[in-house]
Structure formats: C-alpha cells, structure tokens
Image (cartoon, rainbow, N blue to C red):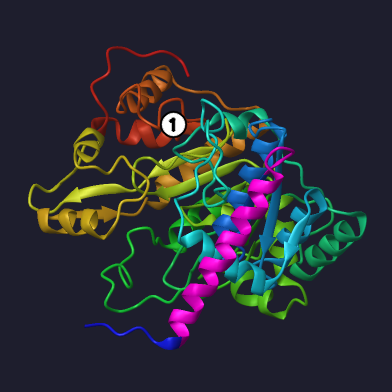
Amino acid sequence: MTHTKPGDRLEAVLVDVLSLLLKGIVLLASPFVTIRIGLIGHRSLGRLVGAMEYYIRTRDRGMYDPREYHILVSGTNPVNRQVLTMIRRRLPVVCSDLLWVWLKRIQEKGPVPTEPTRAGPPARLPLWLNLSHTGFMVEWETWQAVSGRHVLMPEEERRGREILRILGIPEGARWVCMHARDLAHTDNPDFIRHIENPLALNDFRDCDIQNYLVAADWLTSQGIWVVRMGAQVVGPLVTDNPMIIDYASRFRRHLPDAEFADVYLAGRSKFFLGCTAAVFFYAKIFDVPICNVDMVPLAEPGRQADDIFILKKYWHRHEERFMRWQEMVDRGWDWHRAGIDHFAKLKAEGIDIVNNSPEEVLGAVMEMNARIDGSWKGEADDAALQAAFRGLFPHNHPMTGFPGYVGADFCRRNRELLPALAGGEKG
C-alpha cells in the first residue's frame, strides 16, 4: 500500500483550491472575455522557438476567437533568452517560476489542451492553450500563409557583425549553418539520457556530422562559409578547411552571449543544413530555408515551400536490401513520434536505420543552393518521383499536402524504394 506524505496531501489540496479559484475568475470574466492561459515550454528548445513561433503565426492568421484574452506565462530561465526577449517584443509574457510551476500543476489535473486545426478553433474553448507543438502533423497552411515576425534591433545587428568578425567570416560574405544531432544533444537541458532507456545510447534520430563535410567543402568551393552549430556536441569537426568554422566546439563557450549568437548565425544564414533536432527553428523563425537530412521516420518534411528534406533509410540485414518506403509505412514508420516499441520491433525484424551518405547530403545541399540562386534545373522524371513519394500517404493522412520537396537527387538515387512510376515529367 502506498502512503501519501503529509506535504504531498497539503500540496494536492492547495492545487485543488487554486484550481477552483482560477475557474471562478474565468467564469466571472466569461460574459466579457474568454480567458485562456498558455504555459510556454521555456526549457525546451523546440517548444520555446518552434512552438511559440507557430502560436504567433496562428494568432496573426486569425485562428483564435477575437474575444479571447491570452495570458502567457514563462519561467525565468529559458533555454534561450534571446528568443524569449524577441517573443516579449511581440506579446506580453508573465515571467515567474512560482506562477509557472503552480499553473503547470493545475493544468496537469485537467484535460489535455487542444489547438487550432484546419477547421479552425474548437467549438468549446478550453482554458489552456496548447503551446506544445509547431503545427506539425496538424496543419501546414499557417507556415505558408504568415511570414516570420521577429526582427533584430540595430544594436543586435551590430553585435552580430562583431560575432562574425570573431569567427573570421568576412564582411558581406554568406554562410550556411549546419547541425547534426548526436549523443551530446538535448532539446531540454534538464533532460538526462538514462542508461536503462534503450534509446539513450542508440537514439535512431542521432546522426554523424562528418557525413556533412563533403557538402560543406562543396559550399566553400562556391565561396560560401559554413558554421557548425550546437550548444553541446560530442567532439570537434575533423577538417582542415579554413572556411568551415566549428563554432560549436571552438567558439561558442567563449562568447559572452552565446544564446544570441545561436539566433543571429542561424537567422542570417543563406540556409540551414539540419536534421530532426529543433536547432533548425532558430533559422525557420526568420523564414530561412531549411535543408534537413537524416530525417526519421518518414513523416518528417520541412515547414515551408522552400524547404528540402531527405530521409534515413532502413537496411534489412537478413535480406541484404533497403526497405521500400511503402514497407515502412505499413510498419507504422510514417508517423512522427515513432517510439521505443516501434524501434524494438524493427531491431527484432533485423532492420537497421541507416544515416544518409555524404553523397546524399551533398545532393540535397546542391539542390537547395541552386533553388535559392534561381539556377535549379530538374530532370525529366523529377515531378513523377515527387508525386510517387507523396502518394505513399492516403488522402486523409496528416502528411497530405506537406510543403517543400523531397530531395530530387535523393529520389533519383533511391527510385527503387518508391512505388513504380507510371511516367515522368520535368520537375
């Protein structure tokens, strides 16, 4: 029998009392205004940067009832202070650790928050705003319809130029940021990889930054600098190319405001070469194009029409072949949050998840750079290959209508993994 400590019982009573008080205030105000509360996930990079950007864009798009009054609450130690500063320029935010903690406890006793969908806001508005996602697998239109609203102040632009000077990037030069998730990465600094978790030391989302170096070298041959991003990384880059800057390993810890540097470097880059890690949202909040590689599972596209993505592949050890995409959809790997159970089933079946090759990464990077420069020329069957990939998902699937492109070179190299083509046309 489990015994509840007196302190826990008192806390539970206080939560109940505060919950009733809060509901009373909301009820009294309801004839005049609909109060809704949003708890900002300030300790999560994905939620602070990506989810809050999506929320701001849904507001600007008019997806909330005009009678609603939103109270946003954050803790005082966000994962990135520069991002919270920019959010507060746009919206009033109450910053209080005590208030956030108590509201979180009250929220956890109630129903799960809902969010706007393609059909608009829910008919019965809940008290709690859902600030936990970026619109991914819910609806794609908001990221297309509303542009980024964040701006850097003149003083911040000056500080940014000083950071470029420290890194050795010449004035007027263009650069690309790149980031690969590894064992050192965490979306939340409070999270610890526990050894008993099967994914702790074998997270299928992790990838190898060294596989990006062929693409990075090619970018520098085009006169474009490359900056390796990351707050924590396993180790330094192995390269002697002076135009590839290991900001994550060599410079970041020495800067007086590295969190600002993270935002500036990504937000002013030509494009961002990333993966599943939420670091790419530093660029996306400024509408910088994203070239995401090593994406897993299959339902991992970009957010906007100028984004490109390519996928990890699945090697069947016993049959010595790569799995076709349709086979992976049939196994449930078309959904975003494939978890430990999904991973265990794949391992039991003898299926390994394989990182993108340096050549595949290079193909995606070359396409992204050409599309931005307006020099991209597709091949005859590119459009058919894109359509074949999109056709993997039924019409009511959340991936339907996803923005952007699967990398053209990636599709050509792996056409045998796609459904058979009925024909081709120029992309």
- In the depicted view, which residue is nearer to us: 36 or 117? 36
SS at badge 1: helix
Depth check, front residue: 216 or 308: 308
The quarter of the displayed image where residue 39 is located: bottom right
One can see residue 113 in this view: yes
> Taking 412 as reference, is 116 left or right?
right
Question: Given the image, on which type of amino acid does mark 1 rest?
Answer: Ala
Relative height, residue 374 to residue 332 (above, below): above
Question: Which residue lies most toward the bottom here?
Answer: 6
Q: State the residue in front, 143 or 362.
A: 143
Segment tinted magenta in the rendering: 7-34
Whether residue 268 sits left or right of residue 228 in the image: it is right
Place of residue 369 in the rendered image (x, y in percent of width and height, measured from the top left) = 60, 38
Q: According to the image, label 1 marks what residue?
A: 408
In the rendering, at what x and y percent does residue 133 appear? 52, 48
Q: Position of residue 427 (x, y in %)?
A: 48, 19
Disc tally is 1
- Magenta: main secondary structure: helix
Quadrant where the image shows the N terminus: bottom left
Residue at (43, 67) in percent of width and height: 182
Front one among 14 and 169: 14
Q: Is residue 22 magenta?
A: yes
Q: Is residue 418 magenta?
A: no
Q: Residue shown at 71%/45% (left/top)?
A: 29
Residue 177 visible in the displayed image: no
Residue at point 42%, 22% (across, down):
382
Q: Is residue 4 above or below residue 216?
A: below
